[in-house]
Amino acid sequence: MTTRTTTARVHARRAAGRTGAARRPSRIGRQREPQRVQMSVRLLLEDDVRLDAALAQTGMQLQDDVTEALRLWFKKLRRSSRLSFSTIASST
């Protein structure tokens, strides 16, 4: 018997589309973190070494560093007109 699993990305999209009563925070008084999607990537060894050095130098966590790098990359693509919101909307 084969079981079908749903990826974290699908769960995140479904949860984002739900409306209704807000869920109670897991800890009272603690703000919820932004919703994230779990991803797995493979890096070249040279890039991994450079990433480790950059994280050690900046003191940032991997999640923060990747988020910042993606934001800068998207901004650069948007400025060079290679990325537009219509492109994103048509690809999803």
Image: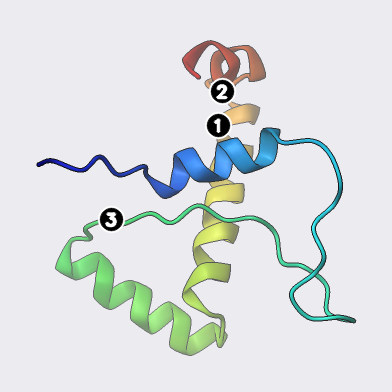
Q: What residue sits right under mark 3 in the picture?
A: 41
Give me the C-alpha separation between circle 2 and circle 1: 5 Å
3 vs 1, front mark: 3
* Residue 10, placed above or below residue 54: above
Q: Nearer the viewer, residue 84 or 26?
A: 26
**Pointer 2 residue:** 83
Q: Position of residue 92 (x, y in %)?
A: 50, 19
Across and down, in percent, residue 8 comes to 43, 49
Q: Name the spot of residue 28 as percent of width and height, x first.
A: 86, 80
Residue pictured at 78% horizontal, 81% vertical: 27
Question: Quick one: SS at disc 2?
Answer: loop
Q: How far separated are the C-alphas under marks 3 and 1? A: 21 Å
Whole-percent x, y for residue 25 in the image? 80, 69
Vertical comparison of 33 with 83: above or below:
below
* Amino acid type assigned to the residue bearing label 1 in the image: Leu
- The residue carrying pointer 1 sits among few (fewer than 14), some (14 to 19) or many (20 or more) residues within 10 Å by Cα, namely few
Res 2 → quadrant? top left
- Disc 3 to disc 2: CB gap under 8 Å: no
Are the residues at dot 2 and dot 1 in contact (C-beta closer than 8 Å)? yes
The image shows residue 53, relative to residue 48, as above or below, that is below
Q: Residues within 10 Å of mark 3 (few under 14, many from 20)?
A: few
Judge left or right: residue 41 versus residue 89.
Answer: left
Residue 77's disc number: 1
- N-terminal label among 3 and 1: 3
Q: Amino acid at mark 3?
A: Val
Camera-side residue of 74 and 20: 20
In this orientation, which residue lies closer to the viewer: 6 or 48?
A: 6
* Residue at the image position 49 percent from the left and 62 percent from the top: 66
Q: Which mark is residue 25?
A: none
Query: Which of the two labelled residues, at mark 3 and mark 2, occupies the earlier sequence position?
Result: 3
